[in-house]
Amino acid sequence: MVLFVFAIILTHKPNEKSAPLEAHRKFTGIAASVIGAVLLILALFKMPLVKGISLAQAFSYGGPQITMHDIGTALVGSEKFQYLLPFEAVSVLLLACIIGGVVIARKK
């Protein structure tokens, strides 16, 4: 998030005034945000995170226990339901966005 904020700061001209958003664009943005948040929460609670156990199952009383070792293995592992490859892909994408923001800011 911090990288996105820096990219916006680098590409925004301080003296430039932008047109106010129209009402239908505000509604579209709010609707898209709410739908995205609901889908994210559903995915977070329903998808298997560690050892095929979803977050809802882990929070249930008497549910399976997840240790810190299991969480660490899930975050840096490269097997099914482990997140090393998506993490690296997002980091490369963010780096490309920042480099593009700096290049655009320098050209103006």
Image: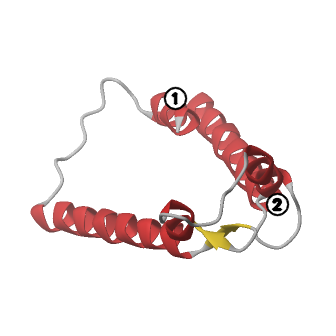
Along the line of sight, the residue nearer the viewer: 105 or 22: 22
Residue 102: where, in percent of width, then height?
63, 33
Which numbered marker is on residue 93?
Answer: none
Furthest residue in direction left, as rendered: 23
Q: What residue is at 76 percent from the left and 69 percent from the top?
A: 51
Q: Is residue 34 above or below residue 7?
A: below
Mark 1 in CB contact with mark 2 (< 8 angstroms)? no
**Dividing the picture into quarters, in which one does residue 25 lie?**
bottom left
Left or right: 106 in relation to 39? right
Q: Amino acid at mark 2?
A: Leu
Mark in the foreground, 1 or 2? 2
Disc 1: which residue: 10
Q: Is residue 96 above or below residue 65?
A: above
Left or right: 8 in relation to 65? left
Residue 101: where, in percent of width, then height?
60, 39
Disc 2: which residue: 85
First in sequence: mark 1 vs mark 2? 1
Residue 95: where, in percent of width, then height?
72, 42
**Dividing the picture into quarters, in which one does residue 100 lie?**
top right
Along the line of sight, the residue nearer the viewer: 43 or 71: 71
Q: Amino acid at mark 1?
A: Leu
Residue 37: where, in percent of width, then height?
37, 63
Estimate the spatial distance between the alpha carbons at disc 1 and disc 2, rounded to whole Å: 29 Å
Q: What residue is at 42 percent from the left and 33 percent from the top?
A: 12
Q: Is residue 24 above or below residue 101?
A: below
